[in-house]
């Protein structure tokens, strides 16, 4: 991987095996109550039109002419950072035509930097439509019960912190937002927010730097600050909700105390796999396979926030039994009751995924982005070395620092 | 085992294909430069295969048995399961059951041969006991209940239930908690012997691997059977109408959503004919219901559909259903507008320019799909059972014309449609 530092950071990822060239622009801003909804909304307006392609129909027809290109917007929460991403994917020139590269660069620049503006704001019709869309989306959180459980646990666990905010904002805030507000947010982000670009595939560096010189040479703010979860509740905060589900679900939120840039994060990653990530994990082998209590049970880390979530779907009458089993497995980790085999399997599991990171352009960009935000960007190879060098003592040490903070039950 | 090598210049891809003495077809797609290696070992046996003839004798099995068998095949003689073995070799293993097939797969970076050995060996060596069947009844019951709480899945299954009278595609893939309670170990062995026959299976490998090693591992694990594959699948003659015009279900969801499903009874196609039909249908759906389509834009601007709007096709040689789905504040209004839009497309057709643009875009996407090893392998494994080859799509594009698309349009969007509705739970009382 090659890094070019202008006022924006541009990473050129190795990628000559693909038939796709992909360019993604990531802007980072602080996650705050005042800005979250506006910043979640305006990216989607860019997809609906620009000055040269003034409606959704012409944008999408242009994408078709570029051999089925893709333009996507993504909004994500990475710790206390709100990441707004614009992702483009196109067929490699070798499989299309000689003009493809130039045409695609022009299109990307148009969509990002030349939005449709009327009366100092975004198009009113676009805004109204997208507000409705986003409202539907936010209200739709409830439809996917598994994800809903995680979102609710996050809200409860981080109550009072900005991290409790939903990355797509709130329906109440949406009502107040004007086309002009949104255009101001857009300008603020595009002109001043820290920017990272990933390029993968046959895009020539010089051509890219030339076309996007305005954007990448602008002076930008530093990355927003991030802090980990630190509440140290003596007894877990417990929340229950009833929706008359056929199957109950619950999620447990743990504090780990480990910062994203700490060496111990790698040990935590390994502990997570021993405990609950993968079919070799203690949770899968015991709570599912031995006790037959569930179809899914897993643990998952939030690196930026230093937390670990456990999720499970099981009958309501088995909640206590499953809860006890999950905590028992964690206790075994703390006591060091971990076999050499479990450690070996977990290492192989994590390393297998790391080795394949470079086979998918998005995964590779995402991998580097996580490292950058965590303040410790490593290549997949360097990450693998970290995992390989870990011992049981490392796992036990990080396990001992894990405490249950919040429980969320849905039935 | 001899392999034939085919190079496809338009894709820059090579495919090795060979037939093993057992009757198993084996394919290898080399992907130089990729760390990931992937293998899928599939059987043409899915949730719809519950009634069939073996030696002239009719057999009727409980719903959900194909999926149950898929879970149970991971069990190893003497205890333990295949996941344990894959854990040792760093393989990421999984399996899935669809309406018409079951696939066993893994991906890995290292120890490919060892992982492939495990895959071929556990699928060829069933081990069912009274205890392990009982344990699985518990796990699968939880899986079924998980899907019961999934509004999208319920909506989809209700659409199939509404469209079909008899075809088992109308049943849930996993069956019901009740139906799987009838499954016994003897049942599973019988099914296994009947359907898991090399002639009814395929192995597809993708990645930077050695084809000769693949051949050796197939030799080692796949044995020739003493009889050929002899199942006569039941053919369902569906009436030219739908079973129910509408199914409504209430769940705790944010707003109403719907599936408008069309049942197309022109079935029985295989090979390039079926592929052409699939591709034409996909193109039509894009020309009508994607953001590059005038009709989509009209519905979107009027607020009749939102970002959740999409389409899907469920097709095989025995059923062909096309679905339009999404959220809608007033389902009746949206469905009416969609139907009216379809009628107007039928009347006005498409411009040549529109068709060419759409074909160009679809071809570009299909070429790019080769970047994703897993999805290429999975779609090939599914197509194989209908005699569709990996690169066949390239020769089908030129055969798709304005006339053939219009003919398909009339066939797919016919009057045999049903609406599946999901509504938020009514409040009050």
Image (tube, coloured by chain):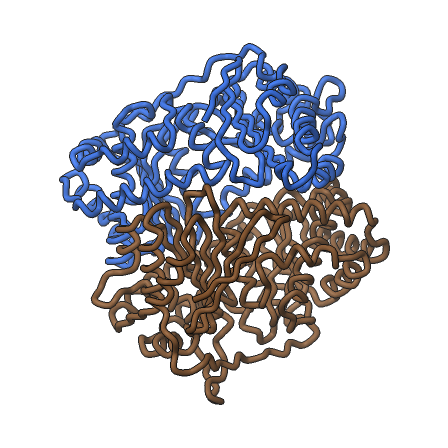
Chain colours: A blue, B brown
Q: Position of residue B318 (x, y in %)?
A: 60, 72
* Percent position of residue A390, x then y: 22, 34
Nearer the observer, A26 or B404: B404
Q: Note whether residue B364 is visible.
A: yes
Image mark count: 0
Q: Pick whichever, B110 or B244, lies toward us.
A: B110
Task: Please name the residue shown 54% across and 40% down the image.
Answer: A18
Q: Is residue A319 visible?
A: no
- In the rendered view, tell whether residue A149 sits above or below residue B165: above
Q: From the viewer's side, name the closer residue of B371 and B346.
A: B371
In the rendered image, the residue lying farthest to the right is: B348
Q: Residue furthest top?
A: A219
Question: Relative to the observer, which residue lies in front, A387 or A81?
Answer: A387
Relative vertical location of residue B399 with respect to residue A6 in this rendering, above or below: below
Q: Determine whether B116 is above or below B309 in the image.
A: below
Left or right: where B8 falls relative to B173: right
The quarter of the picture where the N terminus of chain B appears is bottom left
Which residue is drawn at the image coordinates 41% and 43% (left, top)?
Answer: B35
Q: Residue at x 33, y 66 (%)?
A: B220
Please provide percent x and percent y for residue B100: 52, 67
A342 lies above or below A62: below
């Amino acid at each position: 991987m090659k890094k070019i530092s202008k006022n924006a950071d541009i990473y050129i990822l190795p990628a000559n095996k693909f038939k796709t060239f992909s360019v993604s622009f990531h802007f980072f801003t602080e996650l705050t109550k005042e800005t979250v909804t506006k910043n979640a909304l305006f990216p989607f307006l860019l997809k609906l039109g620009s000055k040269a392609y003034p409606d959704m129909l012409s944008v999408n027809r242009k994408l078709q002419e570029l051999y089925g290109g893709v333009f996507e917007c993504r909004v994500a929460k990475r710790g206390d950072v709100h990441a707004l991403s614009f992702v483009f994917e196109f067929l490699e020139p070798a499989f299309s035509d000689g003009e493809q590269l130039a045409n695609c660069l022009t299109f990307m620049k148009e969509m990002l930097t030349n939005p449709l503006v009327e009366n100092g704001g975004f198009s009113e019709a676009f805004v109204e439509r997208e507000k409705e869309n986003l409202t539907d989306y936010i209200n739709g959180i409830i439809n996917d019960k598994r994800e809903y459980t995680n979102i609710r646990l996050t809200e409860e666990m981080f109550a009072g912190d900005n991290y409790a905010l939903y990355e797509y904002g709130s329906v109440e805030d949406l009502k107040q937002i004007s086309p002009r507000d949104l255009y101001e947010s857009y300008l603020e982000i595009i002109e001043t927010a820290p920017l990272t670009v990933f390029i993968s595939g046959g895009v020539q560096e010089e051509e890219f730097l030339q076309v996007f010189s305005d954007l990448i040479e602008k002076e930008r703010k530093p990355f927003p600050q991030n802090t980990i979860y630190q509440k140290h509740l003596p007894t877990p905060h417990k929340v229950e909700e009833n929706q008359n589900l056929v199957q109950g679900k619950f999620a447990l939120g743990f504090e780990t105390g480990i910062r994203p840039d700490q060496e111990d994060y790698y040990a935590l990653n390994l502990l997570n796999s021993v405990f609950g990530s993968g079919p070799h994990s203690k949770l899968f082998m015991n709570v599912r396979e031995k006790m037959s209590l569930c179809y899914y049970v897993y643990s998952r880390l939030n690196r930026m926030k230093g937390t670990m979530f456990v999720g499970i779907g099981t009958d309501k009458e088995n909640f206590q039994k499953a809860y006890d089993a999950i905590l028992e497995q964690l206790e075994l980790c703390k006591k060091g009751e971990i076999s050499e085999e479990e450690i070996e399997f977990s290492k192989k599991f994590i390393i297998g995924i790391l080795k394949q990171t470079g086979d998918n352009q998005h995964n590779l960009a995402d991998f580097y982005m996580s490292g950058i935000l965590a303040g410790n960007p490593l290549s997949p190879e360097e990450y693998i070395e970290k995992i390989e060098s870990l011992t049981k003592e490392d796992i036990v040490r990080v396990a001992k620092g894990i405490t249950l903070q919040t429980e969320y039950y849905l039935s | 085992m001899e392999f034939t090598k085919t190079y496809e210049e338009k894709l820059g891809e090579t495919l090795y294909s060979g037939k093993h003495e057992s009757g198993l077809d084996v394919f290898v797609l080399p992907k130089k430069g990729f760390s990931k290696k992937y293998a899928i070992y599939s059987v043409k046996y899915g949730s719809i295969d519950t009634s069939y003839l073996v030696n002239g004798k009719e057999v009727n099995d409980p719903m959900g048995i194909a999926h149950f068998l898929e879970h149970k095949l991971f069990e190893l003689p003497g205890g333990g399961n295949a996941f344990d073995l894959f854990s040792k070799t760093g393989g990421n293993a999984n399996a899935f059951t669809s309406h018409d097939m079951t696939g066993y797969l893994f991906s890995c970076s290292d120890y490919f041969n060892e992982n492939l050995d495990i895959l071929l060996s556990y699928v060829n060596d069933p081990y069912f006991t009274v205890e392990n069947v009982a344990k699985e009844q518990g796990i699968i019951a939880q899986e079924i209940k998980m899907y019961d709480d999934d509004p999208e899945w319920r909506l989809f299954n209700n659409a199939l239930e509404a469209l079909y009278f008899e075809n088992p595609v109308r049943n849930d893939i996993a069956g019901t908690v009740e139906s799987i309670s009838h499954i016994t170990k003897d049942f599973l062995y019988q099914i296994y012997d009947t359907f898991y026959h090399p002639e009814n299976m395929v192995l597809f490998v993708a990645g930077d691997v050695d084809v000769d090693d693949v051949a050796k591992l197939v030799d080692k694990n796949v044995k020739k059977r003493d009889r050929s594959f002899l199942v006569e699948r039941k053919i369902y003659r569906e009436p030219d109408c739908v079973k129910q015009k509408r199914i409504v279900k209430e769940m705790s969801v944010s707003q109403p959503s719907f599936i408008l499903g069309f049942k197309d009874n022109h079935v029985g196609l295989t090979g390039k004919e079926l592929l052409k039909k699939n591709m034409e249908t996909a193109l039509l759906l894009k020309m009508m219901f994607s953001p590059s389509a005038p009709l989509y834009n009209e519905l979107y601007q009027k607020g009749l559909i939102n970002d959740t709007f999409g389409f899907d096709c469920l097709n095989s040689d025995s059923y062909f259903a096309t679905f339009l789905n999404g959220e809608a504040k007033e389902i009746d209004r949206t469905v009416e507008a969609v139907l009216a839009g379809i009628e107007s497309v039928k009347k006005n057709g498409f411009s040549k320019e529109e068709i060419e643009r759409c074909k160009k875009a679809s071809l570009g996407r299909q070429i790019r799909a080769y970047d994703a090893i897993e999805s290429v392998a999975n779609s090939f494994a599914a197509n194989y059972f209908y005699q569709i080859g990996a690169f066949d799509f390239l020769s089908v594009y030129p055969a798709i014309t304005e006339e053939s698309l219009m003919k398909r349009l009339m066939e797919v969007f016919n009057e045999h449609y049903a609406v599946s509705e999901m509504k938020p739970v009514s409040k009050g009382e």
